[in-house]
Image (cartoon, rainbow, N blue to C red):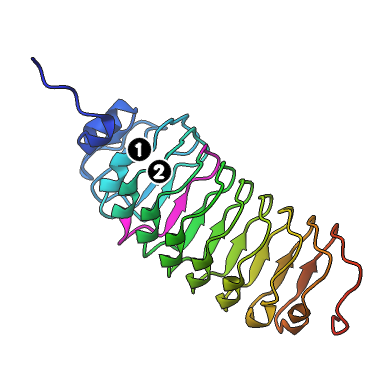
Amino acid sequence: SPLPSPSPSHLPLPFFLSTMGFIFSKPAEEPAAPGTVMLTEDTTKVNLSSRSLTEFPEAVTGLKHLVTLNVGYNKITKIPASIGQLSNTLTSLTLAGNQLRELPEEIGALASLTDLIISKNALVALPESIGDLKSLRSLNAMLNRIERLPKRIGECQSLEKLKLSVNQLSELPESLGQLSLLSELDVSSCHLSSLPDIFDSLTSLDNLNIRNNLVAELPKSICLLPSLRVLDARNNEIGKLPKRIG
């Protein structure tokens, strides 16, 4: 009997991409028609956003020089473990606007990653391995269903921007206090009833947005932010401000 056909994720990259309407070519060949996605063995940027993909194009993890990958605004429900194969090169990953409920632990292998955009999905948690992203500078996880942050998020020592607006967080981990380079923190519309008293450690924090929560009292350490320029605490349940604020 004939051998079964290989699954798309295991097809050779050129053939796999051709089945999706993409062209894989050698650099010496003439440019393709307008609108065609051209990929070569030396491709550094891939933009497959808004193409109605229902599966992550796993074969792109075979691109050894890939720096930027955008598969945003598709219908992808799962990210494969093979994403970790891009550990040496990938600096920017956009997964926004899909139907993801979770991320694989292997995402922590992306040691060069500086920008991660996972907004507008259905995520309920982030993997603990996110603490391995030592180069990560910006994390956008807005508009999900995240109920808790991993304690190891405090190990993202390069993190400068953390956007978590419109999630279902009941609390923030004290490990956030380890993010000494954090300049922007947005936890607006997250159902928070309290804030950890860790702000004196966030010496670089410039913009803090806690709008539209259930916070009744601001921690005293919020008065000890030397770099704070913007504090948006509207629509909370704050009865009084700390004496030292202002």
- Residue farthest along the right direction in this orientation: 239
Image point (69%, 71%), residue name: 196
SS assignment at label 2: loop
Determine whether 152 is above or below 198 in the image: above
Q: Is mark 1 on a helix, strand or loop?
A: loop
Q: What residue type is labelled 1?
A: Pro
The answer to whether mark 1 and mark 2 are in CB contact below 8 A is: no
Disc nearer the start of the sequence (1/2) = 1
Where in the figure is residue 244, as x and y percent of width and height?
85, 85
Task: Return the x and y of residue 90 as percentages of the image width and height.
Answer: 36, 57
Work out which quarter of the rendered image holds the N terminus and state it.
Answer: top left
Q: Could you classify mark 2 by the number of other residues whose Cα lies within 10 Å: few (under 14), some (14-19), or many (20 or more)?
A: some
Q: How crowded is mark 1: few (under 14 residues within 10 Å), some or many (20 or more)?
A: some
Q: Nearer the viewer, residue 116 or 102?
A: 102
Q: Residue furthest top?
A: 1
Q: Quadrant of residue 15?
A: top left
Residue 67 occupies quadrant: bottom left
Residue 163, numbered label: none
Identity of the residue drawn at 29% across and 33% down? 17
Q: Is residue 91 part of the magenta span, yes or no?
A: yes
Looking at the image, residue 48 sits to the left or right of residue 213; the answer is: left
Name the mark on residue 79.
2
Q: Which amino acid does label 2 sit on?
A: Ile
| Residue at the disc numbered 1 | 57
| Disc 1/disc 2 C-alpha distance (Å) | 9 Å
Q: Identify the residue shown where x is 78% and y is 69%.
A: 231
The prevailing secondary structure element of the residues shown in magenta is loop
Q: Which of 16 and 42 is in front in this view?
A: 16
Tally the numbered discs: 2
As drawn, the residue found furthest toward the left would be 1
Instruction: Judge from the rendering whether residue 219 lies leftward or rightward of residue 29; answer left or right.
Output: right
Q: What stretch is highlighted in magenta?
A: 86-99
